[in-house]
Image (tube, helix red, strand yellow):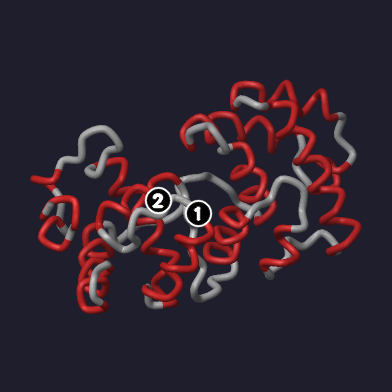
Amino acid sequence: MRTQEQVGEIVRLLLAEYPEAGCTLDYDKAYELLFSVRLAAQCTDERVNLITPALFARFPTLEAFAEADVEEVERYVHACGFFRAKARDIVACAQMLLEKHGGRVPDTMEELTALPGVGRKTANLILGDVYRVPGSTVVDTHCIRLSNRMGLVDDVKDPVKIEMALRRLLPPEKSSDFCHCLVLHGRAVCDARKPACERCCVRHLCRHFSG
């Protein structure tokens, strides 16, 4: 494990390296982000961003999604993979948002994770990016890999355990942005197969680099 001073320096350096870090999914409304994250499961954000303009144009309101034929939604999201489950969840989620939340995306972990297709990762993204709730910690594959390599956690693969560990380590007001930095750093430098340690701004603080 890194010391609190080391963690603070890792956070500072990565935030400086990626000052514009944010969600890479395109959306205008909170529910659009919710649906886009569902589509991004086992799919790239880039592909989702190619698909959602037509999807959101065909179903321009939450009511339109709630009344949509699931098979028609499937045709729009087919290229995202697992399209049947994703289309079903999106329509059911729209219906629940209208019936139980008055059309508003809820702002608590409990209410968000009760929605169809919404887990803790998605809920944390909504809480952090839409509602700016301190401590929101999105644990995706990049976060799992980099947290272990850097030594923020010790050989932990369970996303919930990593989330709880990072909540204890990270400054609450910076945790959401830091997680976005991990995504960008994971794509640009700390690759899954061969990390480019020579280009890493935190290599001197990284357990993987120091051996």
Please indicate whether residue 90 sits to the left or right of residue 68 in the image.
Answer: left
Name above or below for residue 186 compared with residue 205.
above
The quarter of the picture where residue 188 lies is top left
For label 2, the residue is: 144
Q: Position of residue 171 (x, y in %)?
A: 38, 77
Which residue type does callout 2 highlight?
A: Ile
Name above or below for residue 37 compared with residue 167.
above
Callout 1: SS: helix
Alpha-carbon neighbours of circle 1 within 10 Å: few (<14), some, or many (≥20)? Answer: some
Please indicate whether residue 170 sits to the left or right of residue 90 in the image.
Answer: left
Name above or below for residue 125 compared with residue 25.
below
Q: Quadrant of the N terminus?
A: bottom left
Q: Nearer the viewer, residue 17 or 115?
A: 115
The quarter of the picture where residue 12 lies is bottom left
Alpha-carbon neighbours of circle 2 within 10 Å: few (<14), some, or many (≥20)? Answer: many
For label 1, the residue is: 159
At x 11%, y 55%, the residue is 210
At x 75%, y 41%, the residue is 90
Mark 2 and mark 1: Cα distance apart in space? 7 Å
Name above or below for residue 159 compared with residue 134.
above
At x 73%, y 61%, the residue is 105
